[in-house]
Each structure stands twice: as C-alpha cells, then as structure tokens.
Amino acid sequence: MVNRASHPPPPASRKPKLLVLELWGIGDLIIASPFLREACRSYEVTLLAQAYAVEMRPHCWPGVQVLPFRMPWTVHRGKYRLHKWPWIQLTRLVWQMRREHFQVAVSARWDPRDDVVMWLSGAQERIGFPRMGSGVVETRSLNRPDPIAHRHERWRTIARALDLVVPPIGEAVQPVSRRNGSVLLHSGAGKLIRVWPLERFQGLIRRLRTAGYRVQVACDMEQSGWWRDHGEREVSVPTDLENLLQLVNAAGAFIGNDSGPGHVAGYLGVPTFTLFGPQVPEWFVPLHPEAEWMEGAPCPYKPCFDYCRFPEPLCLTGITEEQAWVRIKAFVERHVDR
C-alpha cells in the first residue's frame, strides 16, 4: 500500500480530484453523461472507461479526462480465466491511479469489482453501492434507488452524496425537433441476444417507405453483407462516433435495438423507439423524455446481460413485425413529416 502521508496534498486553488468508474458499454457511458458534466463544475474529473470513451469525450463531456482501460471481466466470454488476465497492465493501471492522488472515487454500479478498483486507486473517499460485503472497502455506502428505477437514478444518488444536482430523467436531455429529417433505423447491438431479426427490420423499412418516409439504414459491420444481399444499397456502417453523429444529426427519429447508437441518439435530442428483449426497459431506456419502447415476451430468466438459456432470445423474437409496426407507425407520425 502507498503511504499517503508521503504525498503532499494538491494546491488549495485546484478542484478536488474525482475518479469515476464506468467500465462497460457506450450506452452506460451515455447514461452517466449528465452526472459527468455536472461533476466537472466542482471536480477535476477522471473517467476510467473503455477506449471508446476517448472518442466520446469531446462530444459528451469535454471537461473530463479519460483513463482508457478494458477490465478483463467485461469481455463477453472467458471473464475469469485468470491466467489470461493482463496482470502487468493491471498493475500499471493501479500505480497510474495512485499517482493522481484522487480525493474521491465513485461508481454507480452494484458491483464489488468496482469497489475493489476504487480501493486500489488509493482514493481517500470511496462512494458506492455495496454488495456481497464490499462495503468494507467503501468509505461511504449508499442505499440503492428503487430496484425498478432507471440507472440514471443511481448517478443522481451519487450526485446528491457529492452535493451536486443532476436533473431527473425527464429533464436530462433537451429534445430537438427535426420533422423533415429521415428515420434512422439501426439494426445492430453489442450482443446478439439483443438483435431483433433483420428480416423483420426489413419489413418495417418497406412499410415506412411505402407510407412516404425517408429511411436511412445503419448496421454493424457483420450485418452489412446481409443488407446489401437483400437490396439495401445505401446501408451505412458507422465505424466511429463521428460517422454515427452525422447520421443522428440528419435524423428526425431513431429506431433500433437496446444498443449504444440508440442511447447516443436520445442523448443528442432525437426521439427513440427501442425494441427490448432480455433487458428491463425501465433500467435502460434512452434518456430522451419522449423515448418509447416495446418490451418482449415474459421470461423467468430475465434480465439476461450476456447469455440466453435458449437457442434464441424468445423474448425478443416473440415480437412480430405486425406488432412492432402498430407502435412504430404511431411513433414516427408524431415526430417526422413525410
């Protein structure tokens, strides 16, 4: 352990240093964004996150410094093959965090792994939501919000503990009206169990175009061949945030799976419609105040974060094209002109 007494305190004129942990996906970072922006008013903020946070920084929270690192337990498979963990890089990360002499570290996740990382950082105050006895390495343990509350509420709880004010979810984003924009439909997602069948998306596109709407199709790289083979000649594959922002800024509405692009669109003020399967919509719906969603069929194993017990996510594939069209037709009519 580092002897803190041997390190002089930061100059009084500087803001206190705050370490924020959000180690998972783009959508999780977007949900944390209102907190990050508000925290910069009172703290010198460093965000420990995956590398795409570096690209997000100038667009979402320019006052934040990003410490990029992918923790080994955030991979899809083989999370705990300890002999394959990057132990040298992990050790360097710990020393890098300790050299910063953080006054405070926070995590909005109910995850003992985050609590251990905060403890290893050497931060003087460590604020989080304890689980499985992890409160012993926190200096201040908080009560979790209502279990059905949106994840945004956890960041609001952290904010109150720091005497910060983060608005409720209905006020976190300023909507934009772009009625002459296109309908942006993104068929990808970070996990296959969150992808609605592509042929049903294709059916929605056909119906939207028949109704007179302009539709821009976007997808993940591995889906692009399918779309082109099925006649979509102008499908867009946003390979970085800049590409995605160009698409979002031309859109009047967004349709897609429970995915990062939907969260980005909602945060930038574009109304979103999300097809949810194995997740709980109330936790992860995009921040836009007019965001809408359709929840899949009930399943006793929901929520599923990485894996499905069945050959396919029946909760999501149980949503038919006709069921989705009834809801999406009304959603698009409210936000986009033909």
Image (tube, helix red, strand yellow):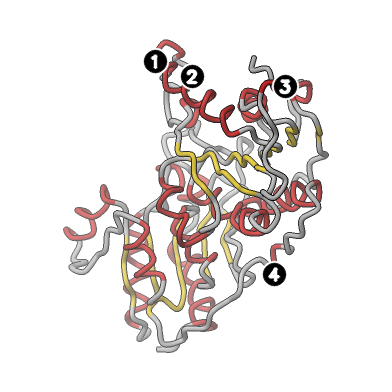
* Residue placed furthest toward the top: 83
Residue type beneath disc 2: Thr
Q: Earlier in the sequence, mark 2 or mark 3?
A: 3
Q: Earlier in the sequence, mark 2 or mark 1?
A: 1
Residue type beneath disc 3: Ala
Residue neighbourhood size for the residue with mark 1, other residues' Cα within 10 Å, grouped as few (<14), some (14–19), many (≥20): few
| Residue under label 1 | 84
Q: Quadrant of the C terminus?
A: bottom left
Q: Earlier in the sequence, mark 4 or mark 3?
A: 3
Between 83 and 337, which is closer to the camera in this rendering?
A: 83
Where disc 4 sits, the SS reads helix
Residue type beneath disc 1: Lys
| Residue under label 3 | 5
**182 to 203, vertically: above or below:** below
Callout 1–callout 3 Cβ contact below 8 Å: no
Query: How far apart, in angstroms, are the residues tagged by discs 1 and 3?
Result: 35 Å
User: Residue 131: image x %, image y %?
Assistant: 74, 27
Query: How far apart, in angstroms, are the residues tagged by discs 2 and 3?
Result: 22 Å
Total number of numbered discs in the rendering: 4
Where disc 2 sits, the SS reads helix
Callout 2–callout 3 Cβ contact below 8 Å: no
| Residue under label 2 | 91
User: Residue 250: image x %, image y %?
Assistant: 38, 77
Please state which of the two labelled residues, at mark 1 or mark 3, is closer to the viewer: 3
| Residue under label 4 | 171
Query: How far apart, in angstroms, are the residues tagged by discs 2 and 4?
Result: 40 Å
Callout 1–callout 4 Cβ contact below 8 Å: no
User: Residue 105: image x %, image y %?
Assistant: 68, 37
Q: Quadrant of the N terminus?
A: top right
